[in-house]
Amino acid sequence: MKIKSASFWKTDLDLVRPYTIAYKTVSSVANVFIELELENGMKGIGACNPSKQVIGKDANETFEELQKGNWQDQLVGKDIRTFEAMMRELHLGDKPRKGYIAALDIALFDLWGKFLDQPIVGYLGQQHSKMPTSITIGIKDVEESLEEADEYVGRGFRYLKVKIGEEVEKDLERLQKLRERFRDLIHIRVDANQAYTLAELISFWEVAQNLDIELIEQPMPANEPWEQLPLMQQVPAHLMPYIALDESLRFWEDAHLIAGLKPVPCGIFNIKLMKCGGIYPAMGIARSAQLERIKLMWGCNDESIVSITAALHAAFANKHTAFLDLDGSLDLARDLVSGGFTIEDGMMSLHGGAGLGVEKL
């Protein structure tokens, strides 16, 4: 069964609530969509919103890549039954560094799942059926942070990821107030977005460890891995298991490099499909992590339900998935699809259905 056509488009999606992280404020997001169609009319959809700060391209540049490239000619006419060979070719060499590869990978997985008439997670091997996701509070003052936390707790969320990175003292004040307000009702994770020095990280953790913080995501700058990982290895041993690498862990080869270090400079890999290029390389990263007993966290950018659902399929296919941070579609004012997953009291589960299980609106 051959691929008959491949189309793509870009859509700007407004956020219900703008937010601030260490280096920018975000109020709307562009997502790029790819749709593939088989000869029998069956369609698969993929989407992406890559981060320029991480892989060097944003959604607008990704859309330009699609317009200028000859990727459609290389894809149309291929038989979906050669799925594995297509995936190896798609992720060969430097292709994952093209911004649209994640969207194309997801569209192919969606199409393949529909062709097999089973969910992607079933094809990959389901290990989980339901897990809680964190929901993110951006960099705000104490009162705004507490107000937003009140809203999320009222909606049933119990896992909060708090963006930090202003000053250690200010960061700790917000976290202390959150813990005082909610006590053991909530779990707290933090994301420093590369804002700390090693000394600041150690100073932060001396206090934060008493606040029952689950993890700290990417505390120090993520230059090229071979430049900054030796510094990460200087993190005290008692803190290392709580470190989740994000920007340091981009592509499949980064995972091999990091997992092979002694000591491994983290206890958690934060896998994002938008960084590594989709489901196929994400599963490779997960295998590298499993060999070194590294826990998995599945994260996201501001993304459509399409790619959030794709990440959830991959997350549920790995036994060592310990953390979900898949809230990227929750604050979109609109989306182009429905379905995919449900969230009830902060717990995520897949809808079921072949492929991704999403439907275009």
Image: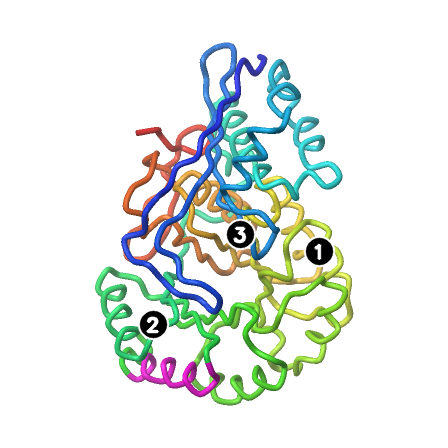
Measured along the vertical axis of the image, is residue 37 above or below residue 9?
above
- Give whichever of discs 1 and 3 has the lower sequence position: 3
Circle 1 packing at 10 Å, graded few (<14), some (14-19), many (20+), is some
Q: Which residue is mark 1?
A: 254
Residue at disc 1, secondary structure: helix
Q: Is residue 170 magenta?
A: yes
Asked which secondary structure carries label 2, the reply is loop
* Stretch of the chain drawn in magenta: 167-180
Callout 1–callout 2 Cβ contact below 8 Å: no
Q: Looking at the image, is 108 positioned above or below residue 213? A: above
Which residue is nearer to you in this view: 22 or 234?
A: 22
State whether residue 158 is above or below residue 327. below
Q: Choose top left, top right, bottom left or bottom right for residue 234.
A: bottom right
- Amino acid under disc 1: Asp
Where does label 3 land, which residue? Answer: 51
**Which three-letter amino acid code belongs to the residue tagged 3?**
Ser
Residue 186's disc is: 2
